[in-house]
Image (spheres, rainbow, N blue to C red):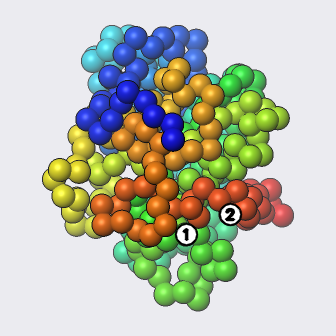
């Protein structure tokens, strides 16, 4: 098991204390709210050039102003990105120039109460949380390869323990739609994206990828679930919620680590059944065969085949 000196109480600022990311370029999706803001702030404070890839550009500019006020003049920019629309994803990747050292696939939607279709008829949460990020990562592959030892961080969730990817019917054409099952499979898919990058790209392009469960943080993500229901002892602040993401994105401790699932600053233990505290990682979320099958599914849409 991969361990670090950090844990549940650690903050994003603490895990990058003393780390110099000057000369590194980073993209954080969904950085106009929640833990994406704190992730962008911590990376910028450490010296990285950070692009906030957001659907709400106006909010993104407000966040940039707030970060600059907090840390001084940082290298930050805002660019539009709607992960539910593959055309905007393509526009984003086609216009990106130069190397990319850090890609944080942070944005997401959670437990939409009714079945909504996204790109190519995909169930909406799979379309946004996985497929949009898959297309983004694929489109940025050359820039990640050019950076040398680039890192991709994929935001999963303890909710992956609610469902594997339902390969025979991922879009609920036959299975009755359940908001949390749909969210769970989308977060399993996010973890499998990190596994796929590791198995298919790491050796050839030097790109590392890991998945993260940020923990239970009260953000806009829970708007469809009636708020945070996690026991108080397991709740995190936004600063704590961004810590593991930031650790994976920028800490030298993780420079050679890939294909793992982290929570509370450390590699999560494998579990064979869903525990009451929703900690640990299910084997189906780290399975290379599942990752390759999902990669083919995503590629069939992104490539138009």
Residue at 56 percent of width and 54 percent of height = 190
Residue at 70 percent of width and 37 percent of height = 140
Which residue is at the front of the view, 19 or 276? 276
Which residue is the site of mark 1?
164
Which residue is at the front of the view, 92 or 263? 263
Tell me if mark 1 has few (under 14), some (14-19) or many (20+) residues whose alpha carbon lies within 10 angstroms of its own.
Answer: many
The answer to whether residue 33 shows anywhere in this view is no
Which residue is at the front of the view, 42 or 120? 42
- N-terminal of the two: label 2 or label 1? 1
Query: On the picture, is 15 further left or further right than 177?
Result: left
Which residue is at the front of the view, 274 or 23? 274
The answer to whether residue 217 shows anywhere in this view is yes
Q: Give SS at disc 1.
A: loop
Query: On the picture, is 292 further left or further right than 132?
Result: right
Q: Is residue 16 above or below residue 268?
A: above
Tell me if mark 2 has few (under 14), some (14-19) or many (20+) residues whose alpha carbon lies within 10 angstroms of its own.
Answer: many
Which residue is the site of mark 2?
290
Q: Give SS at disc 2.
A: helix
Residue at 63 percent of width and 28 percent of height = 256
**Could you say which quadrant of the image residue 259 lies in?**
top right
Q: Is residue 67 above or below residue 203?
A: above
Label 2 and label 1: CA atoms lie apart by 9 Å
């Amino acid at each position: 098991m991969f361990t670090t000196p950090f844990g549940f109480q650690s903050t994003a600022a603490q895990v990058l204390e003393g780390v110099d990311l000057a000369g590194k370029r980073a993209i954080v999706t969904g950085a106009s709210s929640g833990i994406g803001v704190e992730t962008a702030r911590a990376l910028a404070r450490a010296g990285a050039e950070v692009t906030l890839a957001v659907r709400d550009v106006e909010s993104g500019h407000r966040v940039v102003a707030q970060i600059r006020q907090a840390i001084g003049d940082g290298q930050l920019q805002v660019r539009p990105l709607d992960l539910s629309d593959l055309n905007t994803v393509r526009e984003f990747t086609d216009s990106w120039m130069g190397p990319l050292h850090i890609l944080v696939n942070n944005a997401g939607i959670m437990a939409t109460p009714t079945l909504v279709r996204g790109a190519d008829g995909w169930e909406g949460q799979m379309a946004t949380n996985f497929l949009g990020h898959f297309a983004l990562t694929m489109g940025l592959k050359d820039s990640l390869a050019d950076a040398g030892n680039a890192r991709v961080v994929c935001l999963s969730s303890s909710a992956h323990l609610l469902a594997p990817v339902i390969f025979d019917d991922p879009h609920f054409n036959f299975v009755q739609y359940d908001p949390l099952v749909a969210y769970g499979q989308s977060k399993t898919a996010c973890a499998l994206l990190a596994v796929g990058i590791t198995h298919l790209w790491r050796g050839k392009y030097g790109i590392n990828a890991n998945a993260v469960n940020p923990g239970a943080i009260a953000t806009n993500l829970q708007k469809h679930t009636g708020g945070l229901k996690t026991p108080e002892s397991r709740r995190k602040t936004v600063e704590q919620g961004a810590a593991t993401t930031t650790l994976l994105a920028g800490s030298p401790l993780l420079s050679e680590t890939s294909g793992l699932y982290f929570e509370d600053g450390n590699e999560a233990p494998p579990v064979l059944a869903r525990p009451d505290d929703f900690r640990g990682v299910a084997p189906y979320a780290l399975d290379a065969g599942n990752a390759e099958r999902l990669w083919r599914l995503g590629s069939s849409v992104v490539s138009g085949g």
